[in-house]
Image (cartoon, rainbow, N blue to C red):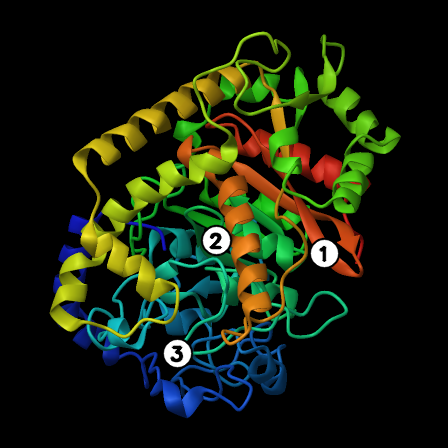
């Protein structure tokens, strides 16, 4: 869940009601989530919910068949082929030869789309805050539509974006179409957006990432994913979760489209041109403390790929004729990339996620506490427990310590990356787990292991507000695993450029 400040969010929710009445005159039937019981199939995925539109079909939007959309279970409304066109969602000033011309785009259901409602993964939220359709797009949606993308639907997500599983208690689990074994979770919270792309129902998709909600599904679903530098993509019109960590991210089928979306969404005024020019001319650091979370065989295979001659050619080409130390080992809690004689006062990265959790919990309650107290919504397992902890709060001493450690980590990583170094981490502990069986201790243990590892891997980028790119590079028994590249704040465009080159050599080929 990512987005606008809590105050802006509340003002927007209050002001949209009157204006939305005017919008309804343009739209035959607004985005109408049916009761969740009516739309959960025997397998637990979202079913029907047909929405009839006043406008005609668009060729690209009609390409996905109704049966494919139904079986994927990734759309919150499941319009039949072609019933949504850009005009229906108030597309404006579309560029004739836009950067994203013809690409099908899906949008996470916590992101505002003009004429449609936002349920943020919870039926009570939909019935209260999301009761009226939006009158305008979120700026990120406006930009991709104006660049020529074709909107194909809003997508499922974990409740209020506070989970990494992709399993929604109310609406089911979007299908992960990658790999050999059916029934794998897609990862969350941007589960539906990832599912739409991996099921070939969209070419690109907008999601949100707080501590991995784009990065983890990208790895589990074999996709390209981007979490930008915090603040570089306008997050107005997005349901907030934890404002100092929330980002608008995106998925794509390939590195080219991932980079193209970045060229549309990233604010050019906040680019770090100096460090971007140096990116890749220093070191490529394999983060050994993150690799330590993998099993022996996976770690060996991923290291071999990242240190292969093909990968080294990409590293050397990035450095050009400038001095470089090439690929090296990095401990993120060390004082520097090469000097192992001194240590920072930082704990191991497996403890960094606790600093994140403390700060996030306070911010989440600031975003949604008043709404929860007023409506007492039903939440699913895990999400329910986290909101209880948020309501209980933390001590001032604990919060002060967490914020102090965050700034120490940020300063440490800023220094580490100032010379244009790129950090390389596994994007997940392993392949996607099977759907959770809450009656099985083994299943719950596997879920806990995957979640804890995801938090440890995701925390450095989130705490330090860094850009991260994920792309698929390995298969484990036929299941995809991604690698994550991380660089200094404001170097997003250069990181996307480098990722495209590296993925061209070591990325999975479909």
- Helix, strand or loop under label 1: strand
Marks 2 & 3, CB-CB < 8 Å contact: no
Residue under numbered circle 1: 480
Residue under numbered circle 2: 213
Marks 1 & 3, CB-CB < 8 Å contact: no
Residue under numbered circle 3: 170
Q: Is residue 50 visible?
A: no
In the rendered view, does 159 fall on the left or right side of 507? left
Marks 2 & 1, CB-CB < 8 Å contact: no
Q: Position of residue 340 (x, y in %)?
A: 61, 11
- Callout 3 environment at 10 Å: few (<14), some (14 to 19), or many (20+)? many
Give me the C-alpha separation between circle 1 and circle 3: 28 Å
Q: Earlier in the sequence, mark 2 or mark 1?
A: 2
Q: Position of residue 312 (x, y in %)?
A: 81, 26
Q: Position of residue 359 (x, y in %)?
A: 29, 40
Q: Quadrant of residue 320?
A: top right
**Which quadrant would the N terminus be assigned to in this image?**
bottom left
């Amino acid at each position: 869940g990512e987005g606008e400040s809590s105050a802006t969010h509340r003002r927007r929710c209050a002001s949209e009601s009157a204006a939305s009445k005017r919008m309804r005159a343009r739209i035959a039937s607004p985005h109408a989530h049916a009761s969740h019981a009516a739309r959960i199939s025997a397998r637990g995925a979202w079913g029907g919910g047909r929405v009839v539109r006043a406008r005609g079909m668009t060729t690209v939007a009609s390409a996905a068949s109704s049966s494919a959309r139904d079986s994927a279970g990734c759309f919150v409304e499941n319009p039949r082929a072609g019933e949504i066109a850009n005009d229906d969602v108030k597309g404006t000033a579309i560029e004739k030869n836009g950067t994203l011309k013809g690409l099908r785009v899906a949008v996470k259901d916590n992101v505002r789309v003009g004429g449609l409602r936002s349920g943020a993964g919870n039926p009570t939220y939909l019935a209260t805050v999301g009761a009226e359709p939006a009158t305008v797009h979120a700026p990120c949606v406006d930009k991709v539509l104006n660049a020529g993308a074709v909107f194909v639907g809003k997508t499922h997500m974990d409740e209020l974006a506070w989970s990494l599983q992709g399993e929604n208690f109310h609406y089911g689990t979007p299908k992960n179409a990658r790999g050999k074994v059916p029934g794998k979770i897609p990862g969350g919270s941007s589960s539906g957006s990832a599912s739409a792309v991996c099921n070939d129902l969209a070419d690109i998709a907008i999601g949100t990432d707080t501590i991995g909600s784009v990065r983890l599904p990208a790895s589990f679903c074999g996709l390209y994913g981007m979490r930008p530098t915090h603040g570089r993509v306008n997050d107005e019109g997005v349901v907030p979760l934890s404002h100092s960590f929330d980002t608008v991210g995106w998925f794509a089928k390939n590195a080219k489209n991932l980079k193209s979306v970045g060229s549309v969404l990233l604010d050019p005024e906040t680019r770090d041109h100096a460090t971007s020019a140096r990116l890749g001319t220093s070191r490529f650091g394999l983060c050994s403390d993150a690799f330590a979370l993998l099993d022996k065989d996976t770690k060996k295979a991923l290291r071999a790929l990242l240190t292969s001659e093909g990968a080294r050619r990409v590293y050397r080409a990035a450095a050009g004729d400038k001095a470089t130390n090439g690929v090296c080992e990095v401990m993120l809690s060390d004082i520097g990339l090469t000097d192992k004689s001194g240590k920072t006062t930082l704990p191991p990265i497996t403890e960094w996620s606790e600093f994140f959790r403390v700060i996030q919990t306070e911010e989440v309650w600031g975003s949604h506490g008043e709404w929860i107290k007023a409506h007492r919504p039903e939440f699913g397992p895990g999400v329910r427990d986290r909101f209880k902890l948020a309501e209980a709060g933390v001590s001032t001493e604990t919060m002060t310590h967490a914020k102090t450690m965050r700034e120490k980590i940020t300063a440490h990583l800023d220094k580490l990356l100032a010379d244009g170094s790129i950090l390389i981490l596994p994007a997940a502990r392993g392949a996607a787990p099977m759907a959770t069986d809450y009656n099985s201790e083994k299943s719950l243990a596997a879920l806990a292991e995957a979640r804890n590892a995801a938090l440890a891997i995701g925390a450095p980028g989130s705490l330090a507000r860094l850009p991260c790119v994920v792309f698929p590079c390995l298969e484990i028994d036929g299941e995809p695993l991604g690698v994550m590249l991380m660089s200094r704040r404001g170097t997003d465009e250069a990181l996307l450029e480098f990722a495209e080159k590296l993925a061209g050599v070591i990325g999975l080929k479909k």
